[in-house]
């Protein structure tokens, strides 16, 4: 992940601004004990090596059953054999079973935590397994891990995991949902407790209803795209006095609210449906929590210079199917 702003030697002096009060309903939610980040969930490293080969379908077989019998993921078998929903198979059909190491997803595990347990890139696991929105894993689902040549079933040691672990906004969006049991639905957005919201898979809007609006007003400090020295800004940076209200750019559901990613400091991610996500970084205060439904224009926090910000500002991103797009192209003219 490339930093959006260059670290400064010192912070600028606070500017006078009227800081909006936090709503009473938010205080009752946010003052509770917050669960650890999703990537620190405990994961049992149970990966098993599958040799692969050709499987001949028998009468009564199902794709899920073949996955259980061979140890490979049924989704991976379907992709390898160009099978489309409803995944019809017939006796005598020859199916290619892809070799590799497969992790069986357990209750409450998240994609990021699984990747961290094996010292692998979650982005690569998403690509390898063809995972798509809403990125909710199924308990018992078998994920093919990158680096199938390594036949070790145990996880790498802590130093190896730390060296390999890298996380960005796209990883949180695609790998932050706890696994669900077969047939269970994700929880509807609510003002539940922080503990409940952090341990449940949360439903995101199916459709994007409307357009985006500016999260705050200010001078554009850095535009979208490539910068000098090989740096890339995946959003825009807007200068604003510390304490300026940050507003949701569109209706949606909060998919992350925290400060565990050092470069962005206080960070909020909102899912809007149809693969659209907005990100708000360098916040001084976060007024919303994961799983909370928000409306366009609602105050979700206040601006600051947390993380690697050289001055009070807002780092703002718009993503479509995890890919950053230029926010200016999707915002109304000033």
Image: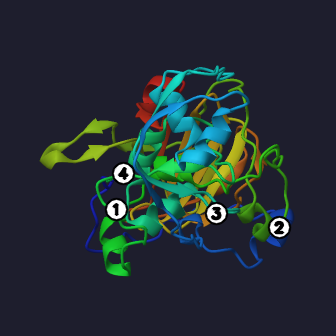
Q: Which mark is residue 159?
A: none
Marks 3/1: CA–CA distance: 44 Å
Q: Nearer the viewer, mark 2 or mark 3?
A: 2
> Which is nearer the N-term, disc 3 or disc 1?
1
Q: Nearer the viewer, mark 4 or mark 3?
A: 4
Marks 4/2: CA–CA distance: 36 Å
SS of the residue at dot 4? loop
Height in image: 287 above or below 231?
Answer: below
Marks 4/3: CA–CA distance: 36 Å
Judged left or right of residue 104, residue 228 is: left
SS of the residue at dot 2? loop
Q: Nearer the viewer, mark 1 or mark 2?
A: 1
SS of the residue at dot 1? loop
Height in image: 171 above or below 8?
Answer: above
Mark 4 Cα shell of 10 Å, populated few (<14), some (14-19), many (≥20)? many
> Which is nearer the N-term, disc 4 or disc 2?
4
Residue 131 seen in render: no
Q: Which mark is residue 151?
A: 1
Q: Are marks 2 and 3 in contact (CB under 8 Å)?
A: no
Mark 2 Cα shell of 10 Å, populated few (<14), some (14-19), many (≥20)? some
Q: Which residue is mark 4?
A: 146
Depth check, front residue: 246 or 273 = 273
Q: Which mark is residue 286?
A: 3
Marks 2/3: CA–CA distance: 16 Å
Q: Quadrant of residue 272?
A: top right
């Amino acid at each position: 992940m490339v930093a959006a702003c260059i670290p400064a030697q010192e912070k600028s002096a606070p500017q006078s601004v009227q800081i909006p009060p936090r709503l009473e309903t938010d205080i009752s939610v946010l003052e509770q004990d917050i669960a650890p980040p999703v990537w620190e969930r405990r994961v049992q490293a149970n990966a098993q090596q599958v040799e692969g080969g050709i499987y001949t379908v028998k009468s009564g077989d199902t794709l899920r059953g073949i996955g259980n019998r061979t140890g490979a993921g049924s989704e991976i078998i379907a992709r390898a054999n160009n099978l489309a929903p409803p995944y019809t198979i017939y006796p005598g059909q020859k199916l290619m079973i892809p070799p590799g190491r497969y992790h069986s997803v357990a209750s409450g595990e998240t994609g990021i935590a699984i990747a961290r347990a094996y010292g692998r890139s979650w982005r690569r696991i998403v690509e390898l397994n063809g995972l798509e929105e809403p990125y909710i894993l199924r308990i018992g689902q078998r994920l093919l891990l990158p680096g199938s040549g390594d036949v070790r079933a145990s996880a790498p040691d802590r130093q190896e995991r730390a060296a390999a672990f890298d996380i960005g906004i796209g990883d949180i969006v695609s790998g932050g949902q706890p696994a669900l049991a077969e047939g269970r639905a994700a929880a509807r957005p609510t003002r539940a407790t922080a503990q409940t919201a952090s341990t449940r898979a949360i439903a995101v809007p199916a459709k994007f209803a409307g357009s985006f609006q500016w999260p705050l007003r200010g001078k554009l400090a850095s535009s979208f795209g490539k910068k000098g020295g090989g740096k890339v800004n995946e959003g825009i940076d807007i200068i604003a006095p510390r304490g300026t209200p940050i507003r949701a750019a569109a209706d949606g559901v909060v998919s992350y609210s925290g400060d565990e990613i050092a470069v962005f400091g206080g960070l909020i991610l909102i899912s809007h449906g149809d693969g659209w996500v907005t990100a708000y970084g360098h916040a001084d205060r976060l007024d919303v929590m994961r799983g909370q439904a928000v409306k366009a224009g609602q105050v979700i926090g206040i601006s600051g210079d947390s993380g690697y910000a050289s001055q009070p500002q807002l780092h703002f991103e718009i993503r479509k199917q995890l890919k950053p797009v230029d926010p200016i192209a999707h915002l109304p003219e000033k």
